[in-house]
Amino acid sequence: MSGCPFGGGEPAAGEKKRLSRRGLLYLAGAGGAGAAAGMAAGLLSHDAVAAAAATENPAASIVPFHGERQAGITTPAQERLHMAAFDLTTEDRTELIQLLKDWTAAAEAMTQGKATGSTGAFDGPYDAPPQDTGEAEGLAAGRLTLTLGFGAGMFEKNGKARFGLDGRRPDALIDLPHFPGDDLDPARSDGDIVVQACADDPQVAVHAIRNLARIGFGKARVRWSQLGFGRTSSTTRSQDTPRNLFGFKDGTSNVKAEDTDLLDQHIWATKGTRDTEAWMAGGSYLVSRRIRMHIEIWDRTSLREQEGLIGRNKNQGAPLSGGGEFTEPDFKLAGKGGTPLIPLDAHMRLAHASQNNGVKMLRRGYNYTDGSDGLGHLDAGLFFIAFVTDPRTHYVPMQMNMAKGDGLSLEYLKHTGSGLFAVPPGIKPGGFIGEGLFA
């Protein structure tokens, strides 16, 4: 390996040695933020130095990659999202398995703040493309998590089984029905494999998807992707409830990482009823929905009507029946004239577990903006992501109930993208993503 591809040889005497991302973090932890920033000042951008300086404990920015479950489900929700769905362009089972192994190795490296490949962005042959795109050099790991799921298209295409996976498609990996009000764009829906990249730094998340796409060239291509910001739910009790683009707290009743019994009951998948779908035991099912919000109309709506549509007050997030944010709503409590304080078509009433046979979801969606639509309206909204044990019993009945009766959905929301993916369980050291499916 050449030390400096631009010079074509080893670094000259006295030349500054490049700092790896891990090396920079080590310096930040061992020598203090000021020392790390000072040593890196000539090599790294202001943002990169600031990110490293903010990380006094390098381990705090790294989420373990291996484990019983994939990271990025119950992991404390990060601030940024880059999600991408891929279509497989190969029909070769061996190539697919190699792709998953290559993606696993790259994901393991990037979640530790390392570059992809053995030579990274700078140390490979001068006349060959680098093994890492390089834009995350100098940045901390940013609590990056990469969560992969398989769509129905990986199992079947044009009515024929693919990759020798006949009979391996889990029964719960259904084709989602058409919900009332859906206006889905095929170019923003479905896909053979989905990758959810979450991080506290948007450049780290973008870097991850970009490198997986680069590695997959010739075997997989991006079908759609979505950037997100400002998490719209909390996945642990240590996080405050965030607000969505309507200005309301979102996800107050979300299942949290601490709710282990609820996770077993509502989030983690079981082995199913057939031996050929047992590979999903311990995984989950990821539902993604791109939900555009009619921001301009909402902004001209009175506060009274806004709160009635949601069912909570806008300031504290408390139910309109009274109490604080986490007070259980009283749907029977009536006000003047016997009218329920929480309207019958309020969003929170129709979404509440008590109105949906007790089912719950773990949500970790994000706000998004994709510019304007050319008519002066923001193309913005919620990129909804939820994990459930079985979409047939959890997501589909709830969404059908809301699509038919939720005043908010009927007037202010439009679903423009959709996807359902089987997320296999976690990866052991030396294994690869979805290994059980090919066993």
Image: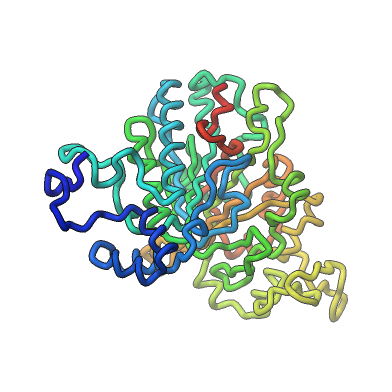
Identify which residue, 222 or 68, lies in the foreground.
68
Pick the quarter of the image with the N terminus: top left
Relative side of 154 to 326, left or right = left
Identify which residue, 431 or 243, lies in the foreground.
431
Labels in figure, total = 0
Residue found at x 51% / y 65%? 230
Residue 105 pos. (x, y %): 43, 37
Is residue 177 at all visible to an observer of this figure? no
Residue 113 pos. (x, y %): 41, 51
Relative side of 117 to 392, left or right = left
Q: Quadrant of residue 409?
A: bottom right
Pick the quarter of the image with the C terminus: top right
Residue found at x 63% / y 52%? 74
Residue found at x 33% / y 52%? 20
Relative side of 24 to 80, left or right = left
Q: Quadrant of residue 331?
A: bottom right
Is residue 266 at all visible to an observer of this figure? yes
Q: Is residue 429 above or below residue 61?
A: above
Identify which residue, 232 or 391, lies in the foreground.
232
Q: Is residue 201 above or below residue 86?
A: below
Q: Is residue 218 above or below residue 354?
A: above
Residue found at x 56% / y 72%? 298
The colour mode here is rainbow
Q: Is residue 301 above or below residue 380?
A: below
Residue 330 pos. (x, y %): 84, 69
Residue 50 pos. (x, y %): 37, 69
